[in-house]
Amino acid sequence: MVKRVTGTITVLLLLMATGSLAQQEERTTALSLEDCILKAMKNNISVAVEVLNPELSDISVSQAREKFMPNLSLNYNKRDTNSASYSFLDAAEQVSTTYNDYSFEFSQLIPTGGSLLISLDGYKNETNRSFQTINPRYGTTLTFNFTQPLLKDFGFNASRREIIVAQNNSDISENTFKKVLQDTIYNVEQAYWNLVYSIENLKVRRQSLELARDLLERNKRAVEVGSLAPIEILSAQADVATREADIFEAEALVKNNEDLLKTIINLSAEEEAADLVQIIPEERPDYKKTELRLEEVNLEEVLLTALKNRPDLKATRIDLKNKEFDLSYTRNQLLPDLSLQASYWSPGITGDQILYGPEGVFGPPIGTIPGTPSDALRDAINFRYKNWTIGLTLNIPLNSIVSRAAYAQARVNLDQAVLRIKDQEQQIFLEIKTAVRAVQTNFKRAQAYTVARELAEEKLEAEEEKLKVGLSTNYFVLQYQRDLATAQTQELRAIVDYILSLAFLSKASGVSLEDKNIEISEILGD
């Protein structure tokens, strides 16, 4: 009794689990092509990786610009020294000196390649030495230093080299990102329409199987009434088995294409147990909807559009700018290093002035006139004591005379970049010609296969009528059924190929983002 109850419970649990699994497998989601593209833009892992590259490039530009941010420097030191006195004229027992100094510096690179330094230095010196006239002594100096290269490293381009290169690399990164987006859009379209094709192909195979099964049933009834030889059943049964095998292959193709589309749009980012979700494409292939676009396909216009909009070509052209800039910079580095230096400084000195009697410094002090650090600072700021210097420094490194390797390398890199652009333009021209020809050819193929499919339907209908009146055989009916299935599959493949050739032409022209109304700023989150 217990075993029977346990077995019953086990069966119920298995049924419940099977029902739950069936419910999970029945989950479907209907998606249009636009839905899939938007999901890919949002969830595709490759896109998510590439999104970070423009951000890193912007950080590199900001980092390069920090070169021209001012630099502030503060410094303070205090020194207290004591030593034995070797002369009663110096001090009684030991010589003690206290010295404090501070400095404040402001430095700034300027766009012409030079630098500007403003510094304010001060000190306080106090000692017990004899023969002092000012003790403690305060000093402050305000200094302006200017350095400007006149040959090597002179100019706006030389000083802003890192910024210019970083900005160009940022533009290259953005165009590379556009290329990834366009490739992703085409991959989505390819996977979506291949899934549509495989689903429609499965329907054709099932329809063909039903036709074969209907013929088999008619043959069985005809054999039962004696109007048909039993051997005719065998050919129909063999054809049914063959078409069942075709369905297994078609079902596997549907699953493979569905898995590919799920991976590209990263469905698992939005759906739990994405493997159990079945995608139902909302769109059906129809070349007639895009028939008007065929008239707009002009080779010269498409080529000009591609040369203008292809992001990979734009990136290569920007790289050419970098190579041209490198050549200019290395040519500048061959010049002698001639620099102009100019300084202007204003010192201020004050302190407690010690007064002596008739004996002078050999007698005891009779009084002091106090001084403060602010007096020295005031004299420095008011330029009471003006000092300046100006000079030129010429430095001729031997490597700029003997070795010109960097300049030669930059020149070769530039020549290579020019050839690379020419080669890329040729490849684009070939790609556009192939894409335009594919659009035109696939459109004509779709039209021709549509006519072939319509004729195959008419032939099958006529042959079935002949079979009903005994003027045909099962062999010809089965042959015409296979011909119809082949014609339907070929028409479907041609229509999908035409739609995909339009998508490839859009990608090859560099206008995929514009055609899909996708703004790169929205994806980057600007």
Image: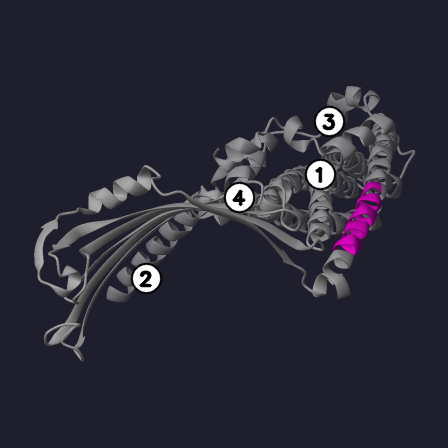
Cβ–Cβ below 8 Å for labels 4 and 1?
no
Residue 286 numbered mark, or none:
3
Disc with the residue nearer the chain's start (4 vs 2): 2
Marks 3 and 4 sit apart, C-alpha to C-alpha, by 48 Å
Marks 4 and 1 sit apart, C-alpha to C-alpha, by 19 Å
Disc with the residue nearer the chain's start (1 vs 3): 3
Q: Which residue is mark 4?
A: 61
Marks 4 and 2 sit apart, C-alpha to C-alpha, by 72 Å
Farthest front residue in view: 358
In the figure, is residue 333 to the left or right of 71? right
Disc 1 marks a residue whose amino acid type is Lys
Marks 2 and 1 sit apart, C-alpha to C-alpha, by 72 Å
Marks 3 and 2 sit apart, C-alpha to C-alpha, by 55 Å
* Residue 127 seen by the camera: no
Query: Which callout, 3 or 2, points to the residue nearer the camera?
Result: 3
Query: Which callout, 2 or 1, points to the residue nearer the camera?
Result: 1
Element assignment for label 4? helix
Q: Magenta segment, which residues?
A: 410-425
Element assignment for label 2? helix
Q: State the residue in front, 189 or 312.
A: 312
The residue positioned 16% from the left and 69% from the top of the image is: 96
Disc 4 marks a residue whose amino acid type is Val
In reply to whether residue 500 is colored magenta, the answer given is: no
Query: Which callout, 3 or 4, points to the residue nearer the camera?
Result: 4
Residue 411 % position (x, y): 78, 53
Q: State the residue in front, 93 or 147.
A: 93
User: What colour-coding does the image apply?
Assistant: one colour
Disc 2 marks a residue whose amino acid type is Gly
Residue 127 % position (x, y): 17, 64
Q: Which residue is mark 2?
A: 7
Residue 314 numbered mark, or none:
1
The residue positioned 66% from the left and 37% from the top of the image is: 189
